[in-house]
Amino acid sequence: MFKYLFFSFFLVIKFTASSQILFTSNQVIEPYLGYPNLGRFSLEFFSDSINKENKEFSGLAPSGLRYSYMLNDVISVGVDVIYNSITENSSTVKTVFMNNEWLTQTNFMTIKLQRLRLHARINFHFPVSSAMSDSYLGLGFGTNSKWKKTIINGNNLEELSGRKAVLFPFSLRVCYGYRYYFNYNWGIQGEVGLGGPLLSVGLSYKI
């Protein structure tokens, strides 16, 4: 009995999956933008501890480029390059006693953070009901590189890179993604996940 149930389940999955738009040997290239830039929250947390003023932030939330290759109709492998940056400009004001008088000193500070992750990816594609859609669960593992620079009044105060700038030299990603294609080649895609952008959207080009 279990043999027949398993066979019936396999036929349903195969029939449903046959409506998907990605098949064996297809290649997919996807530039994307992510949100939010969590590096800002860490900078703001440390900024509050040293009474910074006039804080301004700029940068790029985790964004990048993905490539995947369909090994078969349900599994694809590829790479994911993730880059983000954050720059904080601020000032600190303190009063010091010098030459028998109180003087106000203003220091201008810039903190720059950059992070680059290169992941090997494997995606497990789910059966879908739309012939123009694709749905998958993705797992990634790879490098974790950071750079940090602190500049005060135009002078480099601190510069960190490599293992000095990170707790772990590796990074992980778990995500769920969805693609919708307008024609055979072009579509849009989105992912939600951990270990990279919490949310990302971008273009999807299928070869």
Image (spheres, grey):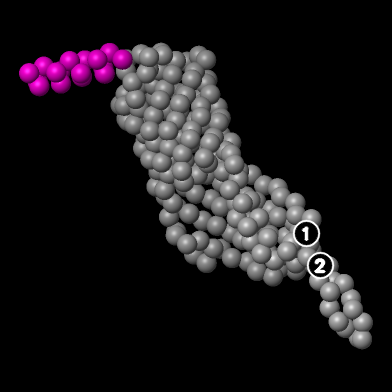
Q: Position of residue 67 (x, y in %)?
A: 46, 35
Q: Which corner quadrant of the image does residue 158 belong to?
A: bottom right
Question: Where does the magenta region start and end?
Answer: 1-16
Disc 2 designates what residue?
A: 93
The residue lying at 21 percent from left, 15 percent from top is 11
Q: Position of residue 61 (x, y in %)?
A: 60, 43
Q: Position of residue 26 (x, y in %)?
A: 39, 24
Give residue 143's mark. none
The residue lying at 63 percent from left, 66 percent from top is 159
Q: Position of residue 164 (x, y in %)?
A: 52, 67
Is residue 12 left or right of 92 when viewed as pictured? left
For the question of whether residue 185 can be seen, the reply is no
Front residue (pair 78, 83): 83
In the rendered structure, which amino acid carries the disc numbered 2?
Val
For the question of whether residue 59 can be seen, the reply is yes
Say if 24 sits above or below 80 in the image: above
14 magenta-colored: yes
Disc 1 designates what residue?
A: 53
In the rendered structure, which amino acid carries the disc numbered 1?
Glu
Q: Residues within 10 Å of mark 2 (few under 14, many from 20)?
A: few
Marks 2 & 1, CB-CB < 8 Å contact: yes
